[in-house]
Amino acid sequence: MVTFGVMVLGVTNRPRAEAFWSAALGYRVRDDGFGGWARILEPPGGTGTMIALQISERPPEDYPRLHLDLHVANVAEQEAEADRLVSLGARRVDWDSYPDDPDFIVLADTEGNRFCIVDLGHESRPSERQRRDRRDS
C-alpha cells in the first residue's frame, strides 16, 4: 500500500530555503538519509508532512498547479503570519485571481515558490475555490 512520503519543492539555493522553511514552520533539518534524501525538513515532534528541497534550474510557475496551504485560525493571525513570513524572506504576490472576498493570501518563498495562508475562520459565501471544487466533484 502506498503512503504519502514527502512534499518536494524545487529550489536554487538549498541552505536559504532550509533556513526559511525551518523558521516559517518550526521544522528541523534531518540528515540521516530518510526516504533517499540526504537532508529533509521534519515537522516538530516528527509527525506531519516532511519537506524535501530539490535543486532545480527551472523557474517557479506563476500559476502553479500544486502549492502549499498554511492554515491559521483567523484574519488577525493571517496578517501577523504573513508579516512574519515576509520578515523571514517571503514576499507578497500581486495575485490577479483573488475572489471578491478571499480567505487566503498568496506569498512566494525565498525561491519564488507560491504558497497561501488560509484563514480557516473566514465566514462568507463559499469561495470561488470551494464553488469550483464542488463543481468538479
Image (cartoon, rainbow, N blue to C red):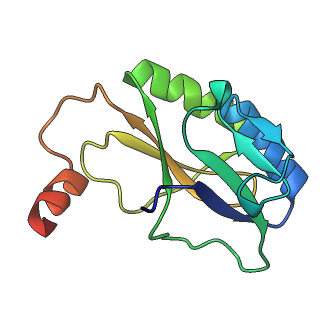
Residue drawn at (53%, 51%), measured in percent from left and top?
A: 115
Q: Is residue 78 above or below residue 18?
A: above
Residue drawn at (81%, 41%), measured in percent from left and top?
A: 30
Q: Is residue 63 above or below residue 58?
A: above
Give the side of residue 97 with respect to residue 56, left or right: left
Of residue 115 and residue 105, the one placed in the foreground of this image is: 115
Q: Is residue 82 above or below residue 133?
A: above
Q: Position of residue 116 (x, y in %)?
A: 48, 47
Write down the quadrant of residue 60 in the picture: bottom right
Q: Position of residue 13 (x, y in %)?
A: 87, 60
Write down the quadrant of residue 7 in the picture: bottom right
Q: Is residue 61 above or below residue 125?
A: below
Q: Position of residue 127 (x, y in %)?
A: 20, 48
Whether residue 61 appears in this view of the structure is yes
Whether residue 89 appears in this view of the structure is no
Of residue 32 and residue 14, the one placed in the foreground of this image is: 32
Q: Position of residue 56 (x, y in %)?
A: 77, 74
Residue drawn at (39%, 24%), measured in percent from left and top?
A: 75
